[in-house]
Image (cartoon, coloured by chain):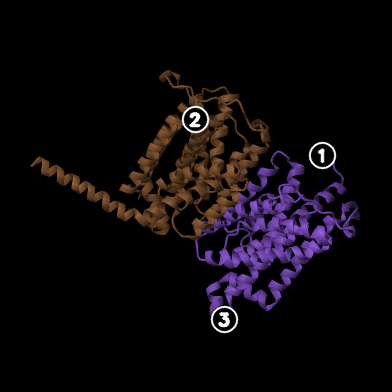
Chain colours: A purple, B brown
Amino acid sequence: MAHDLGFWTLQALNALQLSMLLFLLSIGLTVIFGLMHFVNLAHGSLYALGAYFAASLAAVGGYWMGFFLAPVAVAGVGVLLYSGLIKRMRKSGPMAQVLVTFGLIFAMLDLTRIFWGDLALAIEVPALLDGRLAFLGVEYPTYRLFIIALGLAIFTALAFVLGRTQIGAMIRAGVDNDAMAACLGINVERLFFIVFCFGCALAGLAGAVAAPLLSVTSDMGLQILIPTLIVIVIGGLGSLKGAVAGSLIYGFVQTFGAVLAPQLASVLIYALLAAVLVIKPVGLFPAKG
Amino acid sequence: MFRHNSLRYAVLALLAAGALFQALTAEYFGLEILTEILILAILVLALDIVAGFGGMVSLCHGALMGVGAYTYAILSTKAGIAPPVALAASIALTGAAAWVIGAICSRSHGIYFIMATLAFGQMAYSYVFEAPIFGGDDGLGGISRLDLSFIGVDLNDSRSFALFCLAILGAVYGASVLILRSGLGRSLSGVMHNEQRMRALGLTVWRVKADVFGLSGMIAGLAGALAAQHILYISPGLLSWTVSGEALVVVILGGLGTLVGPLVGAAAFVVLKHELSAVTTYWHLVVGVILIAVVMSRANGIFGWIEARWGARIERRLADTTRKAEAKEVLTDA
């Protein structure tokens, strides 16, 4: 396997792009998970919903309208879900939550089919991001570079908010010990609500961003769900660091696995997950020590 | 520990009578649906043993069933091994795989256990999907059923096959009850209720979990080998995590930890699926809404709801009638 440096740079960029997409999805899920101890299997469905909203909005007002409004619309769906279902399921065990959100996956799968039909939709890449860019000696699609940049920007913003602001400190306190945080006068219930809606918005954003790369189908949420869960379980629940580490591990193992050992690529990541669960059952960087 | 009460016996008798009636009178399509229900019922019994009596909510039972199906198919078609031996081998292999998974996952609890089993299930799924020996995406065909002609039964006839599956389901139900009543089953419910205390009592907790998971895997493997013989064709879709999710849905719909409930759930789920898909293509939506409603209602599924609402009353009435009958006997004797 004699490949030049450019080939490897290209693969690394591919891996990075996959990682950033997964990061957008997993950060919302992992904080919801860590803060609320809530297992939301329907997170992938919210991502699919984001892609559908983006496709419909893009048809009306162009790509950027979809890009900015789809997350808002998905956050709106999140508000409905929270007040209708999730608030009541907070105190139930993990199995009840898994089942309710599994039911939600079923319901949302068919609802998207009812509203948007069975055919796959496509979104055009905006003119601004169309084409290729010479980067580190390789030609790489500008849109994919945009995804990488977006992921890094969101990561930086979240690292700042979680690490340096008051609301970030409140969230970290809630993840660490919600009862104690409530005793200190933090309205944990409202915090949950905000975090949940923000997580939904990020899932919607991921869907809107992924839509031009993949075609928009009703089962795209199911396809992304397992990788997202792997990311947060490898990384450890509730932590930003874990979500980043998990996303990078998944992206690179998946991409380079497919290049170096195509026979084993798909099994590799699951074997890695099993190994992590055996050695460190709570993941690499859990929020709680 | 698992106990039968009059209500459970009554529902079991009703289910058995219904299945037998269907098996003897139905046409081809009805028999196919019946067989589908029976095979699903075997799988959900396996799942109920670990999830309902051991608190081990597994999302890899679909994959275990797939392992059983593929082992049977590969051994009986490509390796040319006699079907009965292939059946035994598929049960043994699936049991062994499940034992290993159970041993590895025994330290995890709650959501981590669910995720770990999901990981193992997906690992099997993607391996089968990719490896050329398993036929990849195309699946495997040309599977033959067991040959029972020496006792005069031709399993290629769908009525005989349905009756065969019914007999196996009965045997599996009996075996499940025996497992749950054995020392192992009692240790298991002890572990579910208080793992720390069982450990303090000197029990090797991981062994108990692994053993039960292995036994449950054997049942799932049997269901898989039957499924392969039923459809005579298998595809990697059988191992997908949504199959495990659906099995869990059936257990919950029926009533977790009741053994009888999942049987009711299997019948309700398959019938609902066929009736709904005849009316609308959006049957997932209806099933999803029903599932959400059942879980939110906090009842333990259909059977759990019946048991909670009418169990005591029916129990009392049945006790009354037996007492009256006895009294009458005493009178006539006198």
Asked if badge 1 and badge 2 are on a common chain, one would say no
| Quadrant in the picture for residue A136 | bottom right
Q: Position of residue B182 (x, y in %)?
A: 35, 44
Q: Residue at x 45, y 19 (%)?
A: B149
Q: Nearer the viewer, residue B49 or A240?
A: B49
Task: Give the label, 3 or 1, closer to the camera.
Answer: 3
Residue wearing tag 2: B27
Q: Quadrant of the C terminus of chain A?
A: bottom right
Horizontal side of B203 relative to A76 (left or right) equals left
Q: Nearer the viewer, residue B43 or B186?
A: B43
Give the chain letter at badge 3: A
Instruction: Look at label 3 and name its amino acid.
Output: Gly
Upstream in sequence: badge 3 or badge 1? 1
Whether labels 3 and 1 belong to a single chain: the reply is: yes
Q: Which mark is residue A1?
A: 1
Q: Are marks 2 and 3 in contact (CB under 8 Å)?
A: no
Residue B242: where, in percent of width, then height? 59, 46
